Image: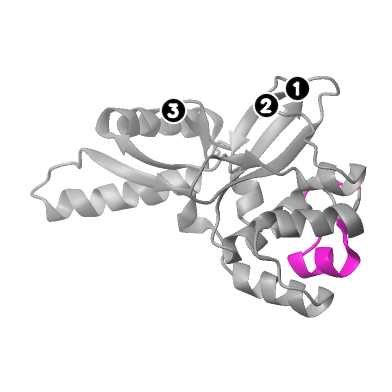
Amino acid sequence: TGDYISRDVQKADYLDMAKRLITYVEKNKKMPNYVTYKGIKVLPRLVIYAFAKILVYYEDHNKTAPKYVTISSKAYTKRTETGNVVYDYWVKKFGFKPTCIDDVCDYIRDHFEYEFYFDDYKSNQQVIDSKAGNCTDLTQMAVNMAKALGYEWEVIHTECRQSGTGHVYPRFRKGGEWFTRDVACIADESTYCVWCDVEDGRGYLLAKNPSWLLENLNR
């Protein structure tokens, strides 16, 4: 799986990525799982799409390659459900309208449960219906609620230093500093807490906004 990316990649870097992609394919007779760019694991389909844009630019600008190309996971991110749909379903199910993300977290603390399973299994509505989920599904649901409430957001993918297990949690901002709300920890321990926190050293940062999570964010 690849990481989330939204970067303007300079000419020297995108040519280097192309050369490494060609070398791998010619040697292994298959596509790689990812192509690295400054420590970011970029999905090959994003690289190919970027080079299609480069070729069009080259043809339209008198055989001149662009100085940079934008590579973005958003080109392949599925958008089948908006944050407002999740918010509206929450209101219909629970009968109250949160006005901030801490209203959501308070309800999760008091009424939801953490459920152990791997990857993303439930849709946002299934998480709301069952009032339970793992860190991935709870985070996806919370991010959609935050989107409807007007927050900026990001998802931290971390590896727990003590156990070695993977974990994700969201961070939010609305006209101020970023703050963390680990909804899985909140659901499990019934208090505001953070598992495998990167900031205090209990977790290693693996990625921000991993593409595998964003692909099903609105499911």
Q: Position of residue 22 (x, y in %)?
A: 41, 33
Q: Residue furthest left?
A: 62
How far apart are the two marked residues, 3 and 1, measured between alpha carbons? 38 Å
How far apart are the two marked residues, 2 and 1, measured between alpha carbons? 6 Å
Q: Are marks 2 and 1 in contact (CB under 8 Å)?
A: yes
Residue drawn at x 88%, y 62% as measured from the top left: 131
Q: Is residue 170 magenta?
A: no
Q: Amino acid at mark 2?
A: Val
Q: Is residue 131 magenta?
A: yes
* Residue identifier under label 1: 202
Residue 198 numbered tag: 2
Q: Which of the image's four quarters has the N terminus?
A: top right
216 sits to left or right of 5: right
Q: Which of the image's four quarters has the C terminus?
A: bottom right
Q: Which residues are magenta?
A: 116-132
Query: In the figure, residue 112 lies in which quadrant?
Result: bottom right
Q: Position of residue 42 (x, y in %)?
A: 50, 38
Circle 1 sits in a helix, a strand or a loop, which is it? Answer: loop
Q: Nearer the viewer, residue 214 or 97?
A: 97
Q: State which tag comes first along the sequence, 3 or 1.
A: 3
Decide: few, some or many residues near mark 1? Use Cα within 10 Å; few <14, some 14-19, many ≥20.
Answer: some
Colour mode?
one colour
Circle 3 sits in a helix, a strand or a loop, which is it? Answer: helix
29 up-or-down from 78: above or below = above
6 up-or-down from 137: above or below = above
* Residue identifier under label 3: 23
Q: Amino acid at mark 1?
A: Arg
